[in-house]
Image (spheres, grey):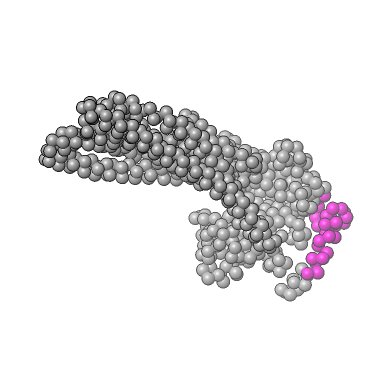
Amino acid sequence: MDDKYSEEEVLGKAYDARLMKRLIRYLAPYKKQVIYAALLLVCTSIFNLARPFLTKLAIDNYILLGDFSGLTIIAGIFIAIAGLSFIFQYAHFYLMYMTGQRVMYDMRSQVFNHLQRLSLSFFEKNPIGRLVTRLTTDVDALNEMFTSGVVTIFGDIILLMGLVTMMFIFNVKLALITLTIVPLLFITAFIFKKKAREGFRNIRILIAKINSFLQENVTGMKIVQLFNREDKNYRQFERINADHLKAYLRTILYFSIFFPAVEVLSAVAITLIIWFGGLDILTDNLTWGQLVGFIMAAQMFYRPIQDLSEKYNILQSAMASSERIFKLLDKVDEIPDKPDAISPAYVRGEIEFKNVWFAYKNEEWVLKDVSFKVKEGEKVAVVGATGAGKTTVISLLTRFYQVQKGEILIDGINIENIKKESLRNHIGVVLQDVFLFSGSVRDNITLANSNTTDAELVRAAKDVHAHHFIEKLDRGYDEEVLERGGNFSTGQKQLISFARALVYNPRILVLDEATSNIDTETEILIQKALNRLMNGRTSVIIAHRLSTIKNVNRIIVMHKGRIREEGTHQALLKKRGIYYKLYQLQYRDQETEVNALSNHHL
């Protein structure tokens, strides 16, 4: 089995007191509903116990004696009990299912809230499909325990104890005969539980695989279609889906054998009761009412045993799901805020890297002894070949990762002493891969920040030349954005992301390959706006396209995790080093095209 799905294999104990104690805490806000539901269940069990007794009473005291009026009273009591039982069961199920849904709501909210605060390294190690499974399948398993497990188990136990007591009161010999079948029932249930355990484990593993494969396939649909992978991917999914079907069918087979087996054993027990009970009636050692009432009690006796086996599986599945959910909730943020971390209301925007070393894994250093300083209001570009460590600089500056050696300062303060939320409030970042959320264009620019006025929104959009195409949309800024911005071009999405960063008016502006996905003509349209917007802000630009950074104050050239060159555009060209080679490879071919388009716009 794949390592990344091995976590799904562990089912754990059928009952774990430590986990149950944590689960019960989720019921604490709804303890009144749970208590009422338990009391209603006790009342329902008492009503069920009354039926065999009333049947015995009706036959022996009224039917055999021809007492019609007494029989009528018993019939009325039966109807009243049935009506009350209906009302109590309705109230019980309503309370428990309502409570279960609320517990699910609370738990899903807690898991989602916790997920958003974990570091990026966590998401790199955990498949999205597995995390989706935590919020869906695993929480559903807990809902089943809360609604059909915890309280109803006690109801079944109360009913069983009452039925055993009643059977011994009716006839000790028949009660002992009935109980001789119980060991066979437990053996059958044990075999069933063992097989069902294996089945549920396989189903859970395959559900996680389906979720992961589906998420990956849908997210990468463009690549799937471009490379004609539809049939191959379908066959892969068909194999996983078929395995899931087989696992489910095996589990269904176990259920389809277990429940008829219980019915057969129940029928054998009833046969023995009729046989020995009939002999006792013939010898006047038993009444008809006792025999019929005992048969009713015996039939009722086997149902809770059957239910308890089912609830065992529910409990086992819930314990396994809760263990995985709590394991996720117990994951600590690898980059926590210090207890005494500060939240500066204002920053000037001075940035300094001092002897920074960083590796994503062990000591495979991505950055090696990197030191540089960006003054307040200065525009600095970081360039280099792929893998040079450019984007890592931004990830460390925004504290997505923690440096192993050295320190990063803003206004002379180590960023480890600044709360992450506060730090990121002062840094506006535009990423290469723009992510748009479902919602309106307005929501995607403001990110639902209610403090942003319409004037600020429009001004930010105009500054990056996004207003021109937004106002042409059918609903303007209220136009709906499809999933991942599917109804916008790459350039339009990039412009929206520019507006998103600028609407917050950050002191530090970071452009991480921000124009790499924009065509040359669109790039020219926003270049003047970028220069104007970077004015007065500390700006760090990561770029492959050298046309976007030739007018910055300083260029830092990185190679294999180290700073190899530093200076202005012209100074670096004269040096004829790494930057000059990058220029030779890229900029000369672009210059002709850019100049032609610039003349066209002029």
x 74%, y 54%: residue? 381
Residue 82 lies, in percent from the top left, at: 24, 43
Figure quadrant of the N terminus: top right
For the record, the magenta segment spans: 565-593
x 43%, y 35%: residue? 309
Dominant secondary structure (helix, strand or loop) of the stretch shown in magenta: helix
* Quarter of the view holding residue 280: top left
Residue 187 part of the magenta-drawn span? no
Residue 117 lies, in percent from the top left, at: 57, 43
Q: Which of 116 and 66 is in front in this view?
A: 66
Q: Which of 547 and 305 is in front in this view?
A: 305
Residue 246 in view (yes/no): yes
x 37%, y 42%: residue? 96
Instruction: Tell whether 167 sits left or right of 475.
Output: left
Residue 494 in view (yes/no): no
In the rendered view, would you say 382 is above or below 266? below
* Quarter of the view holding residue 585: bottom right
Figure quadrant of the C terminus: bottom right
Instruction: Tell whether 96 sits left or right of 468.
Output: left
Q: Nearer the viewer, residue 490 or 174?
A: 174
Instruction: Tell whether 288 sits left or right of 98.
Output: left
Residue 167 lies, in percent from the top left, at: 29, 29
How many marks the image carries: the answer is: 0
Residue 579 part of the magenta-drawn span? yes
x 56%, y 59%: residue? 483
Residue 467 lies, in percent from the top left, at: 59, 67
Instruction: Tell whether 409 sits left or right of 16.
Output: right
In the rendered view, would you say 16 is above or below 592? above
